[in-house]
Image (spheres, coloured by chain):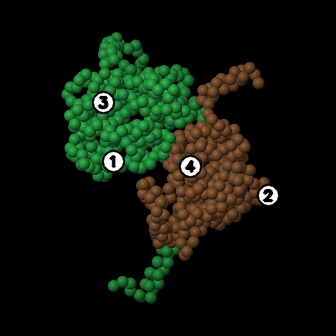
Chain colours: A brown, B green
Amino acid sequence: MTAQTDTMHSMENHAEACFQYNFAYLDEQTKRMVRRALLKAVAVPGYQVPFGSREMPMPYGWGTGGIQISAAIMGQDDVLKVIDQGSDDTTNAVSIRSFFRKVAGVATTTHTSEATIIQTRHRIPEEALQEGQVMVYQVPIPEPLRWLEPSETETRTMHALEEYGIMHVKLYEDIARHGEIATSYDYPVLVGGRYVMSPSPLPKFDNPKMDNCPALQLFGAGREKRVYAIPPYTTVKSLDFEDHPFAVQTWLRPCALCGSTESYLDEVIVDDAGARLYVCSDSDYCAARQAQGHVGDGMPVAAPQGTGKEA
Amino acid sequence: MYVAVKGGEKAIDAAHALLAQKRRGNPAVPEVGIEQITEQLSLAVDRVMAEGSLYAPELAALAVKQARGDMVEAIFLLRAFRTTLTRFGSSLPVATETMQVQRRISAAYKDIPGGQVLGPTFDYTHRLLDASLLTPSATTEDVSAMAQEQAHATVNNVTYPKVMGFLEQEGLLPQASNTEPPAAPEDITRNPLTLPAGRDVRLQNLARSDEGLLLALAYSTQRGFGSTHPFAGEIRMGTVEVSFVPEELGFPVVLGEMFLTECETVNKFHGGAGIEPCFTRGYGLAFGENERKALSMALVDRALQAPELGEAVMAPAQDQEFVLYHSDNVEASGFVQHLKLPHYVDFQAELGLVRGMREAFARHQASAQATTQANAATGTEEGI
């Protein structure tokens, strides 16, 4: 190292010393406050616990709730994976991962099986989660009844009274009007037979993965100042009717890159004529399959015309 | 062959480099200094301190510079710094009746003890662009001499009685608080909002609320959406001392001074909820010179007192859930702008759903058409 870079480093160190942050950014008192709220959340599965959410150095809507949970539970030996839309490489996942590398110095990974904490926005990895892992979900609107009732005072009362009539009426009206439940993501679930809960904006494809899951699932909504949880091996049921059972999305073709027929696919427009390619949204899962020698056909399909249904 | 997108980290670094370049602008133009911002763009600094809820002019100026003059971004920067600071206690309430005022006016009385002090106000300027400011020039002696005289008048440690006090003396205005104030006020930066919110929580929320939102809400009350019949009882701005009682000393110690703008509105009240006809009060307080904010805040504070005064809650400005949950521009800006983040997965789910619904719709149309044609072919008459 040259003398000049030494000087530069010492200047940087000086600037950093002026703005010293605790391990994982939050101070220990704040972490304890978050952990107390999480303990309550785990004790009452699916119940939204108010907590003293802090302003974070990322904007609200970027995952401040999830980031506060990760910061509160993170230890030096943890291995962190961050995904957004199923991928480790989307800009916000990259940004959150590098934030924790910087303020906590923890190891990070893109491999689901290696991670002890997986922070996510909008997906659950395709690879089954294990005991000892923690899923941290970023939640924009924690209240599953919010689209039906804008008032927080009202919705809290509804949860307390287990009064979920409006939700069932909404689902029924969907069927009456469209022949099916017209909700494709953030599909409401009943947790532990008691609380109706928002799974965060996951595609409903991922809902079954939450049921009886060996991993601990924690949900954080920073702006709305709520956390909630699903302890390991808890019943999570997607709301439905006997004659209109819950069903997940399916695709007519496998992933064009790894040939998987079991994963959630993104539709990518690959040319000006609008040809589409269907590829796994979980980039780690897709890459691992390709490494194992699985190959997709790599073939785009022509743009869907008129009312044609592709997915 | 298509490969999944990689390189987000590089793209982010490149974006940050471009941002730094944009912030600096043309390098041939001298870089703006923090002191220039605190001295010459002081109202920007004041707004950032008020909504950033941190009294720190230098840091607020830094935030303004770093944010390229974007007020909401600068407020966010200051908030994100503030949240990391240790809280060692609460100060004593500041005594605004002892304020060293630079400006103090009442629109309710023609004259008041101590007089009306205009201070540095835009109120009576003619909004004509001043070409002389196009080029830097030395301050003309006339202006500086007058300003000196004005400043001199306010430095001599004179305090001015509160206008609202005269109404209180006459019993026309209930005392600010009928009950003992709580030992420590609620802290909205440490505890989540619960409803119904007490006035301490509401005032804290409004004090850091977006100025534009407060202005719009205050304006809406003036146009009939929750009218409060306000008069500007008193607006004062100036410096107050901030005192703190350290546990180990047991007596107050002055920590420093801050510049505040305080506004109290007088509002006609016909009586109700067991209260005789009287006047009521709206209260606004903001760091720095923030008159528009303080006045707007006072109007909204009064509107939010509707339930306590037995008034029907009919308008947005009176609805505490509506106001308190949507007032924070750091929250609002974040959530609105998060729409720029990727939503591929959910959009894919919606694509599938809408395509499916369109297919079902087309099937339904086709079968309806087939039935009509079949009926026509067999000569069946439909309807009467």
The residue wearing badge 2 is A293
Which label number is shown at residue B235? 3
Tell which subunit mark 1 falls on.
Answer: B
Which label lies toward us, 2 or 1? 1
Residues at marks 1 and 3 on the same chain:
yes
* Viewer-closest of B218 and B278: B278
* Disc 3, SS: strand
Q: Residue at x 40, y 37 (%)?
A: B207
The residue wearing badge 1 is B318
What separation in Å lies between label 3 and label 2 (alpha carbons)? 75 Å
What separation in Å lies between label 1 and label 4 (alpha carbons)? 31 Å
Tell which subunit mark 4 falls on.
Answer: A
Tell which subunit mark 2 falls on.
Answer: A
What separation in Å lies between label 4 and label 2 (alpha carbons)? 45 Å
What residue type is disc 1 on? Gln
* Viewer-closest of B372 and B123: B123
Quadrant assignment, res A101: top right
What residue type is disc 4 on? Ala
Which label number is shown at residue A257? none
Outermost residue toward the right?
A293
Q: Please state if A201 lies on the left or on the right of B9 as rendered.
A: left
* Disc 2, SS: loop
What separation in Å lies between label 1 and label 3 (alpha carbons)? 23 Å
Q: Position of residue B169 (x, y in %)?
A: 23, 32
The answer to whether mark 1 and mark 4 are in CB contact below 8 A is no
Q: Residue at x 71, y 45 (%)?
A: A78
* Viewer-closest of A214 and A95: A214
What separation in Å lies between label 3 and label 4 (alpha carbons)? 43 Å
What residue type is disc 3 on? Ile
